[in-house]
Image (spheres, rainbow, N blue to C red):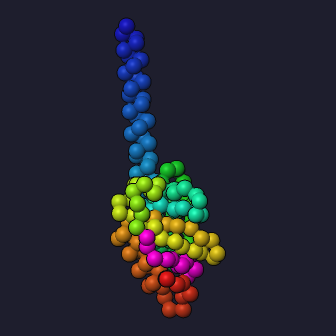
Amino acid sequence: MTDLVFTAEVAVGLLIALVGGFILAMLARRRAIARGKVLTMCGLRPGPGASWRSGFVRFGEDVIEWYALGGVSVRPRHTWQRRRLDIGAPVAMSPGEGLDAIHNAVRVACSHDGETFDLALAEPAYTALRSWVESAPPGATSAVT
């Protein structure tokens, strides 16, 4: 009986260690992705019929980078250049639209070099995106409609 109790204690201890290690790894990944910059939650829908994918968005000097929420990679899955990014008007998302992780999310139709996709952001994050696109240096060809 004592062997069974010891085995159960070891199994529970290993499970707790694995969960703790996973949480620490995700926090370290998020910190590595941020590199001192602010990250915000952002949903990505690559096409009109596709499902939403949750992730983080980070604004750089000339690019916006999208990182998947899960995984171990610290490289962005998508990168869009400010000068070639066009964003549309925000549309409020309903709770049943498939992306409930972002409170008061708005959907924004975007295009970049002929590729169309939708981003879902919280309203303040959309304002930051719009300001970021509009504040392109002189000579930029980006447009906000």
Side of 26 relative to 143 (left or right): left
Instruction: Give x and y (percent) for residue 120.
Output: 45, 64
Considering only vertical position in the picture, is 74 above or below 60? above
Considering only vertical position in the picture, is 2 above or below 88? above
Name the residue at 51% across, 57% down: 52
Name the residue at 36% across, 69% down: 123
Q: Nearer the viewer, residue 130 or 12?
A: 130
Name the residue at 41% across, 38% down: 19
Residue 89 magenta? yes
Q: Nearer the viewer, residue 15 or 35?
A: 15
Q: Quadrant of the N terminus?
A: top left
Q: Do we see residue 36 in this rendering?
A: no
Q: Do we see residue 98 in this rendering?
A: yes
Residue 130 magenta? no
Name the image quarter holding residue 11: top left
Instruction: Give x and y (percent) for residue 128.
Output: 39, 75
Considering only vertical position in the picture, is 33 above or below 90? above
Q: Which residue appears farthest toward the bottom when viewing the image?
A: 138
Instruction: Give x and y (percent) for residue 80.
Output: 56, 72
Name the image quarter holding residue 14: top left
**Magenta-colored span:** 81-91
Name the image quarter holding residue 20: top left
Q: Nearer the viewer, residue 118 or 139?
A: 118
Provide the major secondary structure of the magenta segment: strand
